[in-house]
Amino acid sequence: MSLHRRKPPSVSTLLSQRELAPIVRSAAVARAVSLRARSVDVSSHCELQSNHDGIITALSLDAVEGRYLLSSAADGTLALYDVEDKLGEPQATCTTTDPLAFVSRQHACAHRHATTSVQWFPHDTGLFASGGYDGLVKLWDTNELTVACDFKLPGRIHSLAMSPSATTHALIAACCEGTGTIRLCDPATGSAAQTLVGHRASPWALAWSPRNEHELVSGGADRSVRVWDVRRAGSCLRALDMNDSREERRRLQQHQPEASSSSRKATASSTVAGANRELATPTAHGGAVTTVTFAADGLLLLTAGRDHRMRLWDGHDYCNTLVHYAGCFSTARSQRQIGVTDHGGGGARHTRVYFPGETEGLVVYDLLSGRRIKSLKAHLGEGPVCCTASSKDARVFSGGSDCAIHAWTPPPCGLSRPAQREQVEAPPQQLDWQQRDEVPTCTVEEDGDAWSDEEEEEGEAADRRPVSYSNRARKRVRR
């Protein structure tokens, strides 16, 4: 008998397999990320005990370890939680996590009115900032739970933000109601003199660019989204226009008229048009802007408003990408915090958006396609108000109008509980959470049309004895 040896693969075959390997691997990661995003639900091993008596207005998860969670509420209180993921040591019952620290209304340094925003210091969990309707921006010492410094601003504060990539400054940007301005608070000097003027109504939302430490984006009640360079005094860099897309720019370039003798007249008319354009500022939404947030890499910008729209913008030239997100209903009159996280570590392709909807719970979207993945419902009343997502794993935290804070996580691998039908039909050795005597029994009821013969009645009585439906021996009931 002759043995046929397998021919070794050629060099071209090996090269093609090497080139296709990243594609196959990325496709497998994409499928795993999609399944993980679909399986996110209320955590079965972590329950946060909320001591707030008001609506949860903001959440902040530290970017250093992804372990400590800050929450603020409309009753002026603040809370700090340790939400360390303990999936490696699953517990039989859900444990309730009490706050590590709680700032009540009776605290000497607490806000006297509603606390609207809270955020960790980007590079250290020893400091965090908060702002409220009392017009105060406070920088807290986490260890002592005291205020290191505060800034008194002329109006109520809707939101504040600190740059996640800043290395040369530690500015705290805050939105002031009524004045239509954005104040920059500098903890190094204790001054809040720098003002960004441009909004025609109160600004509601802020976000620093992760790619440029001096670039700030704001959205307000005047339906505009503006980009600022904090090193410049005066007007903003640009205002985003919802009609400005790549397709529109390409169409304008194709139909651009050639230079002719009428170019001088066009230049004169463009000057008048430029003056009118300044009076009519481009709008990013049809209603007040309630959300401004960047993706983790800073290449994409998300905005949402009271026109029930969420828009995706290019973070480089700030053009509208025309991605449609269905079901983004919002009637909020203040900042609405949304969560953006990359589950698979593969950039924008694996990024999910968690939008706190008023009627459909926490809605999960795919960032690039706008595809709606699922809705997460657990909050009572008007639903979730704010949301934050961990950049370390797939955990998501949301706060709602019911004064509750929920943790959303995928189920632990291998620990998912089967359905009720599978519990009854499973063999006894697989029923870890049930005792052997809890297996249901079935009893056959007496038939009203039984025969009158005594022998038949004795046989039917024997068949009417209780029968245990175990997996070792199953008896068929005869009528």
Image (cartoon, rainbow, N blue to C red):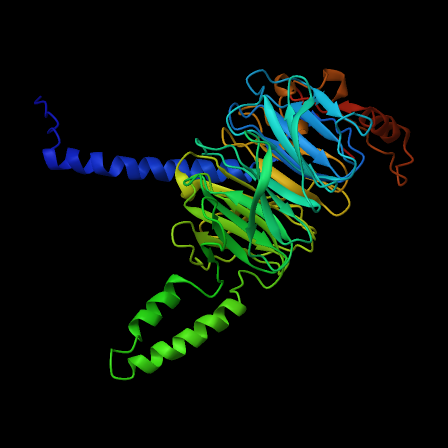
Question: Relative to 147, is 179 above or below?
Answer: below
Which residue is at the front of the view, 219 or 135? 135
Residue located farthest toward the left when viewing the structure as drawn: 2
Q: Quadrant of residue 144?
A: top right
Regarding residue 76, the answer to whether it shows in the image is yes
Q: Residue 51 sits in which quadrant?
A: top right
The residue located at (92%, 35%) in the rendering is: 452
In which quadrant of the rendered image does the C terminus lie? top right
Front one among 205 and 294: 205
Give the image location of residue 277, x and y in percent. 48, 70
Q: Is residue 336 visible?
A: no
Percent x, y for residue 435? 73, 16
Q: Using residue 379 as the reference point, say whether residue 416 is left or right of it.
A: left
How many marks on residues? 0
Quadrant of the rendering where the N terminus is positioned: top left
Left or right relative to 422: residue 225: left
- What residue appears at the point 55 percent right and 17 percent down from the top-left corner? 88
Please name whichever residue, 289 or 98, is drawn nearer the observer in this view of the structure: 289
